[in-house]
Image: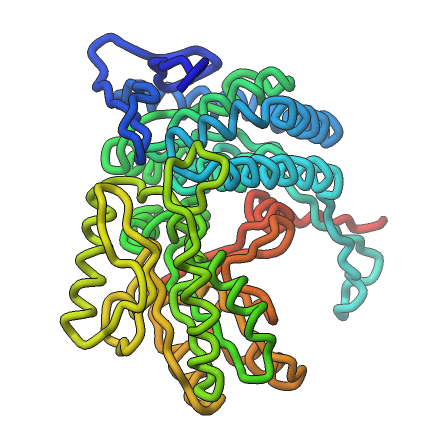
Amino acid sequence: MSGFIVKNIGSVINGKDVIGAGRYRQEVRNPFTSELVGTIDYATAEDLDYAIETAHNVFHKTMKKMPAHERSDILRRTSDLLERDTEVFAQTLTREAGKPIRDSRAEVGRAIQVLRFAADEAKKIGGEVIPMDAAIGGENRMGFIHKYPLGVVGAITPFNFPLNLVLHKLSPAIAAGNTVVLKPAEKTPLTSVMLLRIFEEAGLPKGALNVVMGTGSEIGEPMVIDERIGKITFTGSAKVGLRIKQIADFKKVTLELGSNSPNIIFDDADISVAATSLVKGAFAFAGQVCISVQRIYIQRTVYQEFLDKFVPLVQRLKIGNPLDEDTDVGGLITEESAVRASEWVQEAISQGATALTGGKLNKSVLEPTVLVNVTPEMKVVCQEVFAPIVSVIPFDTEDEVLALANDSDYGLQAGVFTNDINRAFRFAKELETGGVWINEISTYRQDNYPYGGIKMSGIGKEGVKYAIEDMLESKFIGIKLL
């Protein structure tokens, strides 16, 4: 804690802190140590109205007129400032989210890349020429499509990646020329305010980005229904995502929701490589990742060989304070989350599952847990655990495992380990997910490809280039030559 200053923060609207004056104040505590990291003052309904109106006005007066090269330069300078402040951001991420410090530094590194991707894409936004004479009667006419920013984007973000998932919403919105009202997760709000400050230092006009603190019911829902907001981009639970879809009216909506990612290992794969990769994929940030490895399907001929390699690797993971450089696994975001996950494990065991390792609970820490003898209807298999729990399931045939993997309400991302190229392409086609990795874990993500799911995993795509497309309006312009 040496050198770390506990601060009270609130919403930041039009560049100004909005704190005090009877607003509800909440503590932000380190999930592992319970030490006080900061306090936040929640916004009032009037604060939210002011934030949306500010974003609306700044869009019309400034951002929609800003040339692409200026937006690009702001994003590039922000990435440079984030790189300058890497350790400050990483330490804050670890303290407010409980993320191991090595993972926090990796998140900052990815966030820098997101900003640089956005800086590049800001200069590539273009239209399309339409061949009007392709239609009978279209002679002597020209047509083209021009793209315009939407206006105000409402962004609602989760606790698990308080920097990078926020930037997956902010950076494409700004690259496209929009303004933003951001509601960060109540448990991890500090990074968002720090991020706003470096955006402003980089030259983003005050009021182009506003951060509003509060709960989903008191701040999130009013944002979704406000007519001045042109798009909502949300990452979180399927339950909340469905609610947003129901009340968003005619707004554009991007929903990045849950998953219970399947990873399939065939007997022709490198079992040692698969085991090592899957340990990281299942237990990084204590499994609190949307695309975390949750279901591992192993061809029966190598099932025991895989377990003999996988389980010892899991047992070697170091549980400890996330600020320690050698910690692999810390606590869950709250003790309540850890208790819920532990109850799911105990329920599975009572239904016939076996824990080969882990399962012990200590406050917010659940030991990395490997379950076998599970069945498809158990919560640890069919629902999203969002905890350090993985189920290992044997299979015999391709058809069998394909049916098992697709037997899910979710469909975000999957991993397949095989050296058979024909099989790889078959599974890439047949798996019901938004993304498929071959010889890589489902948890792997780069920030420049289209990322998003099907079924209850969501609507729309992230990945800077693809998010920008959905933050623009296309207008057709035709000319008749006289």
Q: How many marks?
A: 0
Task: Indicate the quadrant where residue 216 lies.
Answer: top left
Q: Does the rendering let one see residue 23?
A: yes
> Where does the image place residue 360, in percent across and percent down from the top left?
23, 54
In the figure, 378 relative to 315: above or below? below
The residue lying toward the viewer, choosing from 463 and 210, is: 463
The residue lying toward the viewer, choosing from 105 and 33, is: 33
Residue at the image position 49 percent from the left and 76 percent from the top: 264
Screen quadrant of the N terminus: top left
Residue at the image position 44 percent from the left and 81 percent from the top: 303
Q: How is the image coloured?
A: rainbow
> Where does the image place residue 277, in percent across and percent down from the top left?
54, 62
> Where does the image place residue 437, in percent across and percent down from the top left?
58, 67
Residue at the image position 64 percent from the left and 25 percent from the top: 78
Judged left or right of residue 291, residue 476 is right
Q: Does the rendering let one see residue 66?
A: no
Q: Residue furthest left?
A: 350
Residue at the image position 41 percent from the left and 22 percent from the top: 53
The residue lying toward the viewer, choosing from 148 and 304, is: 304
Judged left or right of residue 173, residue 5 is left
> Where does the image place residue 171, in percent across and percent down from the top left?
58, 36
